[in-house]
Image (tube, rainbow, N blue to C red):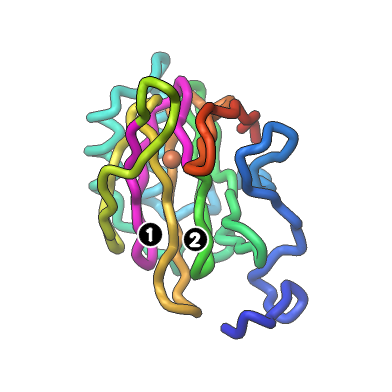
């Protein structure tokens, strides 16, 4: 895809103007409405119905194991996989008593902030494409620094604890999309955003 392409040129690209930075006055990219479970592929629907049974935050190991068993493809959820031309796009799939599930779509070159999940554990499954995750640590004075980056591809599942600090990026060549399923338990209400340009944390509202 050409870098000159606009949202109006591509029906998969939304017209939103999300902002991604570490400033508290800014917000997460637009989140689309949850969809009916009946519209989802059978194994994803069964997974969500199982997660709906939890009346306490889902243990991260249970979440990781269940996400590893998923088999649906990007074609099965393509109608919910909306992209944005200027930032990654969060698409809310379902909210249960103790979690929320989002399909996140990343065009080549799009990245998350450096962030934690502040009170929520997170499971991630790569539905399509490959991602780069960079893990950060913090000095006692609040400066973050990268300790490791790794690339992972379709089918990979990872889990993060609430205060783990990381950044997700689509660093694939132009035209290669990344689609990821994220499950946050309990539902993520806010997250901490960091910068490698200065110390400190901005707490950002993450409510869908
Ligand atoms: Fe994250």
Residue 79 sits in quarter: bottom right
Q: Is residue 124 magenta?
A: yes
Nearer the observer: mark 2 or 1; the answer is: 1
Q: Is residue 154 above or below residue 117?
A: below
Question: Left or right: where does residue 101 sit relative to residue 63?
Answer: right
The answer to which of 121 and 101 lies nearer the viewer is: 121
Q: Is residue 174 magenta?
A: no
x and y percent of residue 23 in the render? 67, 37
Mark 2 / mark 1, whichever is N-terminal: 2
Q: Is residue 151 above or below residue 54?
A: below
Residue 33 sits in quarter: top right
Classed neighbour count for the residue bearing mark 2: other residues with Cα under 10 Å, few (<14), some (14–19), many (≥20) = some
x and y percent of residue 112 in the render? 51, 49
The answer to which of 97 and 157 lies nearer the viewer is: 157
Question: Dominant secondary structure of the magenta stretch?
Answer: strand
x and y percent of residue 72 in the render? 36, 58
Question: Left or right: where does residue 52 sit relative to residue 30?
Answer: left
Q: CA distance from mark 2 to mark 1?
A: 9 Å
Q: Residue at x 70, y 52 (%)?
A: 18
Residue 50 seen in this snapshot: no
Q: Residue at x 52, y 43 (%)?
A: 197
Residue 126 sits in quarter: bottom left
Residue range of the region highlighted in magenta in the rendering: 114-137
Q: Mark 1 — residue?
A: 127
Q: Check disc 2 and report its element: helix, strand or loop.
A: helix
Q: Residue at x 34, y 64 (%)?
A: 130
Q: Is residue 142 above or below residue 126?
A: above
- Indicate the quadrant containing the N terminus: top left, top right, bottom left or bottom right: bottom right
Question: Left or right: where does residue 207 sit relative to residue 46?
Answer: right
Classed neighbour count for the residue bearing mark 1: other residues with Cα under 10 Å, few (<14), some (14–19), many (≥20) = many
Q: Mark 2 — residue?
A: 77
x and y percent of residue 44 in the render? 40, 48
């Amino acid at each position: 895809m050409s870098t000159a392409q606009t949202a109006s040129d591509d029906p998969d690209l939304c017209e939103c103007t999300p902002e991604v930075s570490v400033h508290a006055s800014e917000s997460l990219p637009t989140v689309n409405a949850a969809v009916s479970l009946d519209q989802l592929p059978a194994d994803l629907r069964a997974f969500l119905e199982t997660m709906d049974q939890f009346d306490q935050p889902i243990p991260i190991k249970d979440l990781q194991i269940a996400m590893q068993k998923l088999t649906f493809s990007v074609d099965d959820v393509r109608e919910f996989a909306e992209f944005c031309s200027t930032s990654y796009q969060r698409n809310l799939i379902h909210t249960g008593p103790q979690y929320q599930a989002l399909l996140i779509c990343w065009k080549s070159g799009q990245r998350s902030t450096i962030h934690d999940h502040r009170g929520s554990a997170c499971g991630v499954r790569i539905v399509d494409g490959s991602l780069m995750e960079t893990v950060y640590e913090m000095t006692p004075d609040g400066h973050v620094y990268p300790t490791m980056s790794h690339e992972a591809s379709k089918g990979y599942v990872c889990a993060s604890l609430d205060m783990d600090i990381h950044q997700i990026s689509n660093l694939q060549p132009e035209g290669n999309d990344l689609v990821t399923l994220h499950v946050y338990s309990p539902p993520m209400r806010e997250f901490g955003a960091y910068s490698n340009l200065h110390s400190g944390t901005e707490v950002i509202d993450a409510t869908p």
